[in-house]
Each structure stands twice: as C-alpha cells, then as structure tokens.
Amino acid sequence: MNSVEILLVKDKSDLEKSFQIRSDVFVKEQGCPLDEEFDEFDEWSNLGTRSYHFNVEYYKKCVGTARIIMDNSVNLVAKVQRVCLLKEYRSKGLGLMLMQKIHDFLKEENIFHVELSAQITAIDFYEKIGYETEGGTYLDAGIVHKKMSMKLV
C-alpha cells in the first residue's frame, strides 16, 4: 500500500474534502475572504469539463489539494490554482508529487503550457520544478503574488 496517493476528484465527497482543505489553509490560516475562495470553477457541473481537482491523500487522509482550469478551445493553456497542503504536511515532498501528477495529467490532455499565480512565499518551490516568474507582483485576496509559467516537455 502506498502511503501517498494523488487522486483526480471524481465525486462530490472528494470535492468536499478539497473544499475543506482550501478553507483550512486559505481562509482560516491565511485570512483570505471566504467569498473570494470559491467560484464557478468549483461548481460540480464544471468538474471534468472546465476544471479538474486533485487531492493528496497521506495514509488515506486528505491533506492537500489543487485545481486546474482549462479551456482547450482558446489557447491550450492550463492554469493551476488553489495549490495547498495542510501546514503539518508541508516540506515532505507532497507538493512536488502533486505538481508532477498535474503535469502528467496535462501532458495526457495535450496541454504543454501551464500558468499559475504564486504566493511570494511559494516562488522558490515553483522555480525548483521549472516555473519562471513573469512581470511584477500584485495583490490577490490581500496576499502578494507573482505570475509564473512553465512549458511542459
């Protein structure tokens, strides 16, 4: 049995787990407004068409999540969003495993350009896995961010 699994969310129960992690990290821990955390890409009807969610399970406990927004008809670019792990599970390699799974999924979907909006504190992590910063900093939900992108090979 693997201690870590990165799972594509396929049912409402797993989507609720994703929402709980995001609420714990972004709303409770970081103080983001609840009404800014969830949007139309979190609606069940968009799952598997406009958005995809992944959960990190550590010994069967959901400890992290991420979301991908895709619109293949526009420009074959995916946006990785809402990447987070519960505080006590950071710096264990789980974030890297999550991003690798996302990159593999995108390549299977023939999407090779990825963008994200990184919190300043996470830029080093994303640079280590190949992302490059673009432009200046900006505020999102009261937290300083910077746009980053990567070409998948």
Image: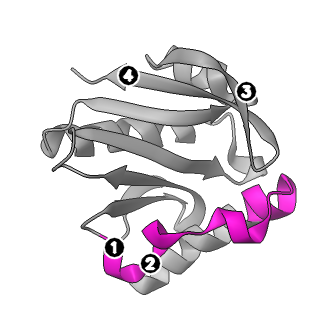
Q: Residue at x 84, y 52 (%)?
A: 30
Cα separation, mark 4 vs mark 2, equals 27 Å
Q: Residue at x 18, y 49 (%)?
A: 72
Write down the region rendered in magenta. Answer: 24-47
Is 4 left, or right, of 23 in this rendering?
left
**Callout 4 secondary element:** strand
Q: Quick one: label 3 or label 4, which is nearer the N terminus?
A: 3
* Residue 108 picture quarter: top left
Residue at which label 1 appears: 46
Q: Quick one: label 1 or label 4, which is nearer the N terminus?
A: 1
Front one among 71 and 18: 71
Q: Residue at x 61, y 33 (%)?
A: 118
- Dot 3 surroundings within 10 Å: few (below 14), some, or many (20 or more)? some
Q: Quick one: label 3 or label 1, which is nearer the N terminus?
A: 1
* Residue 6 picture quarter: bottom left
Is 25 left, or right, of 42 in this rendering?
right
Residue at which label 3 appears: 120
Q: Are marks 3 and 1 in contact (CB under 8 Å)?
A: no
Q: Are marks 1 and 2 in contact (CB under 8 Å)?
A: yes
- Dot 4 surroundings within 10 Å: few (below 14), some, or many (20 or more)? some
Quarter of the image for the C terminus: give it: top left
Residue at which label 2 appears: 43
| Residue 4 % position (x, y) | 47, 52
- Find residue 121 and name its label: none
Q: Is residue 32 above or below residue 9?
A: above
Q: Residue at x 15, y 50 (%)?
A: 73
Amino acid type of the residue that numbered disc 2 sits on in the rendered structure: Glu
Residue at which label 4 appears: 150
Q: Quick one: label 2 or label 3, which is nearer the N terminus?
A: 2
Q: Are marks 1 and 4 in contact (CB under 8 Å)?
A: no
